[in-house]
Structures are given as C-alpha cells and as structure tokens.
Amino acid sequence: PVAPEEQRFCLQEVLDTFKLCLSENEEVSLEHYVAGWRGLVKFLNSLGSVFGFISKDAVNKIKILVGHLDGENGPKYVTVQSMVKYELASDLVDLTKRGNHPESGCRTLLRLHRALRWLELFLERLRTSSEDSKTSVMCAESYNESLAQHHPWLVRKAAGMAFCVLPGRPAFFEVMNVGPPEQVVAMLGEALPLISEVYQVTETLYAQHNLLDLP
Ligand code: 1PZ
C-alpha cells in the first residue's frame, strides 16, 4: 500500500470537505469552506500554469479569509453567519462603493461564492456529459451562466482563452484521480447536492442581508 502522502491528489477528498461545511443548524463553517477552496486551487494548479491567474486570485481571497480567521476577532469568523452578523454590526463592510474595507470577509467570500456556482454548473455538466463532450465548452457555458456576469470584458476574454486549453473529458477525469469514468460520475452525483446546499444557504443569507452586489 502507498503511504497517504505519496498518493496523488484526489478530487473526491476536496468535494468531501464541502460535506463538513454545513452544521446541523445549517451554518457554514468558514474553516471548512476555506479548506475546500484550497483543495480546488490545488486541483486547478495541477491542470497547468495557464490557470495561474485564476488560482492566484483564489489564493489571495483564501489568504484574506484565513487572516480574519486567525486574527484577533477570529471567533467572530467561525461561521459565515457569524461573520456577516459581526462585520455588518461593526460597520466593516463597504456596502455601495469600495472604500475603507476592501478586504471585508463578506465581499471576499462573495467572490468565492459566485465561483462556487460556476463549479456547481460545471460539475453537473461533467456528470451528465457523454464521452465525446468538450470540457472547454461545458466550462465556458457554466462560466457564462454565472461568474462571467460579474467580470469585466478583459477577464472574460482571458478566462475564455484558458478554457480552450482544458484537457479533454478522459484526461480531465484522469486528473481528478477518482477511478474509472463510472466512478467519477457516481462521485459527482454524491458531491453535487452538498455543494449546492452550501451554495444555497450562503445565497439565502447574503440575499437576506442585501449583500449580493457588494463592490
Ligand atoms: C477547470 C477550469 C477552471 C476554470 C475556472 C473558472 C473561473 C474563471 C474565473 C476567472 C477569474 C480570474 C481572475 C480574477 C478575477 C477577479 O477580478 C474576480 C473578482 O474579484 P475582485 O477583483 O472583485 O476582488 N475574482 C473572482 O471572481 C474569483 C474567481 C475565483 C475562481 C476560482 C476557480 C476555482 C476553480 C476550481 C477548479 C475545479
């Protein structure tokens, strides 16, 4: 048997961290949310350096959130719910235009939250795709339906170019390192409802507090 640290990265483990995100009372643990994103970034990096500009931004945002978690007010950042409550009550969020709080937890997490919707749409397409489906097309369609609406022209262009060099479906499944295609499809079928629940809970929370358009 191979020692755990020698095993290649496996996407199932990453998606499993999203399982840990939601507590029984539907609160989202920031620590696990961040851990999930760390794993996704690792996966993205294993796809090649063309995705560097994307993973760099995600890493920056992860760092900001970890900074809050490890900071003196760390206990306020245990869940996304407590973070929202704390930052709003303490006036730590720029609500209408960028100002004194460019690194608020609320606006930073919102960027990852929007990307999570992209992930959900993309993985669902992958799950239901046929052998000859193009990952680049699935990726672009998911992007256009979600994140693209929040990105300026230049970022959309750069993203579109990166999508073109995505490996084909068989190679993509290989990098996920989950097993044969049937097993990938089954894993996605299990992971997706969890990701989508985390997304929905966050979306509802942000909507309730009018935070969906934070600058
Ligand atoms: C498998 C292929 C991966 C495709 C990933 C699809 C997402 C494309 C996103 C391109 C964004 C690149 C540059 C950064 C843009 C930032 O301006 C925005 C807004 O942040 P602000 O400027 O307001 O601070 N950042 C984002 O939208 C967050 C993007 C995170 C993307 C993470 C993708 C993780 C992919 C996991 C792969 C399984």
Image (spheres, rainbow, N blue to C red):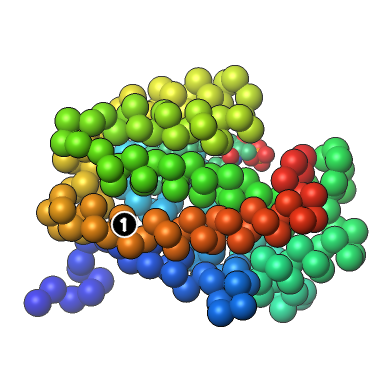
Q: Residue at (33%, 66%) from the top-left corner? A: 13
Q: Residue at (80%, 67%) from the top-left corner? A: 85
Q: Residue 185 versus residue 83: which sits nearer the camera? A: 185
Q: Position of residue 194 (x, y in %)?
A: 44, 63
Q: Residue at (85%, 46%) from the top-left corner? A: 95
- Indicate if the residue with disc 1 has its beta carbon within 8 Å of ligand 1: no
Above/below status of 1 relative to 157: below
Q: Is residue 4 shown left or right of residue 28? A: left
Read off the residue under disc 1: 189
Above/below status of 36 relative to 150: below
Above/below status of 87 relative to 103: below
User: Of helix, strand and loop, which one carries label 1?
Assistant: helix
Residue 78 found in image quarter: bottom right
Q: Position of residue 140 (x, y in %)?
A: 41, 28
Q: Residue 200 versus residue 74: which sits nearer the camera? A: 200
Residue 26 found in image quarter: bottom right
Q: Residue at (80%, 49%) from the top-left corner? A: 210
Q: Residue 89 versus residue 64: which sits nearer the camera? A: 89
Q: Quadrant of the N terminus?
A: bottom left
Instruction: Name the residue type under label 1.
Output: Gly
Q: Is residue 201 shown left or right of residue 2? A: right
Q: Is residue 54 shown left or right of residue 163? A: right
Q: Residue 72 versus residue 206: which sits nearer the camera? A: 206
Q: Position of residue 31 (x, y in %)?
A: 56, 70
